[in-house]
Image (tube, rainbow, N blue to C red):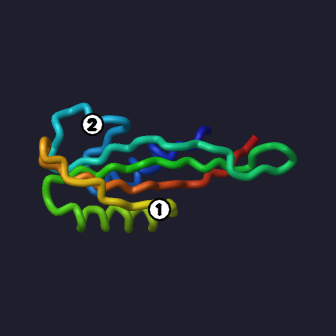
Amino acid sequence: MYNSILKDIGEVLEPLGIPIETGVFSKKAPDEYLVLIPMSDIFDHYADDLPSAELQEVRLSLFSKGNYQARKNEVVSVLLGAGFIITDRRYLGYEEDTGFHHFAIDVAKEYEVII
């Protein structure tokens, strides 16, 4: 079975009720939503010339027309509680043309490779 950080993040954040899509939000954008953008998928550890772990990393973009701070903290708390690694968090700015605040959370998770 293949491990997928995208699937795992979706399952963990589903109870928060925030719409989530991968790559681009294709529907009419609600006042708050998340977009998952895959960043890397690398073999991280080796033993006997074979990978023993892979590290998957995703940028989670939170778009909000309101105060994004509480939701950002909630998302980070849920991810950390589920064993994800937060490698970066940053405010990317206010998009005047859409009215959205854009906050990025870079998330990583290590998976054991079974050969």
Q: Residue at x 35, y 54 (%)?
A: 104
Would you identify the image quadrant in which residue 35 lies?
top left
Q: Tally the numbered discs.
A: 2
Nearer to the camera, 90 or 66: 90
Element carrying mark 1: strand
Identify which amino acid the numbered label 1 is placed on: Ile
- Residue at the right extreme of this rendering: 48
Percent across and percent down for residue 92 are: 30, 54
Which residue is label 1 attached to? 86
Neighbour class for label 1 at 10 Å: few (<14), some, many (≥20)?
Answer: some
Neighbour class for label 2 at 10 Å: few (<14), some, many (≥20)?
Answer: some
Which residue is label 2 attached to? 25
- Residue 55 lies left or right of residue 38; in this view the side is right
Q: Residue at x 21, y 33 (%)?
A: 27
- Residue 40 lies left or right of residue 65; in this view the side is right
Identify which amino acid the numbered label 2 is placed on: Phe
